[in-house]
Image: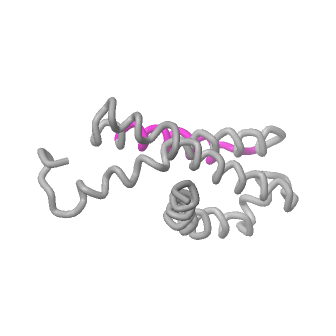
Amino acid sequence: VQVLLICYDMNFKYHRYNIGIIAPIYVNPGFIKALRKPTAAQKGLITAIYYLGTWTSYVLVSGMASDKLGRRYAALTGTVVTCIGGAVQAGSHGKSALAMMVVGESYLDLGMPSFPLLSRCTKGSTLEQC
């Protein structure tokens, strides 16, 4: 039951990001051109990589990083990792576009679960309280 609750919580948090950001990109003419008219299976692969990477990071990386580095540095590390993954995705073009998109998505997903670590820091707290 506890595993189901964790999965439900993760899906609730990250599903909105995926639908709000990734889904509109799939119909963008620039995306379609850069990935050479991706098939439904290729789009599904990108979405599946998102969920697998986010789940793996949420369960295996985020908590340990927060415990070892502290809240601020874990969030900073996650932000940097997410930016690098986004840069790889933004550079996707040519014959290797799908591979770059999948690698970038995988890397980006490792940093996504670190953003909830910032929630305490954004509610009017001082820097020392974060």
* Left or right of 27 on screen, residue 19: left
State whether residue 117 is above or below residue 110: below
Residue 77: within the magenta? yes
Magenta residues (range): 76-93
Q: Main secondary structure of the magenta part?
A: helix
Q: Residue furthest front?
A: 1
* Left or right of 55 on screen, residue 38: right
Residue 88: within the magenta? yes
Task: Locate residue 4, reporting x and y percent.
Answer: 58, 60
The colouring scheme, among rainbow, by chain, secondary structure or one colour, is one colour
Task: Locate residue 87, reporting x and y percent.
Answer: 56, 42
Task: Say which quadrant the N terminus sits in.
Answer: bottom right
- Count of numbered circles on the image: 0
Task: Locate residue 86, reporting x and y percent.
Answer: 56, 46
Q: Of residues 44 and 83, which is closer to you in this image?
A: 44
Task: Locate residue 97, reporting x and y percent.
Answer: 76, 43
Q: Which residue is at a point 30% across and 58% down the rendered structure image?
A: 119
* Left or right of 25 on screen, residue 58: left
Q: Of residues 39 and 17, which is closer to you in this image?
A: 17
Q: Which residue is at a point 33% across and 35% down the rendered structure image?
A: 67
State whether residue 91 is above or below residue 18: above
State whether residue 102 is above or below residue 26: above
State whether residue 126 is above or below residue 28: above
Q: Which residue is at a point 41% across and 34% down the rendered structure image?
A: 64
Q: Which residue is at a point 40% across and 52% down the rendered structure image?
A: 115
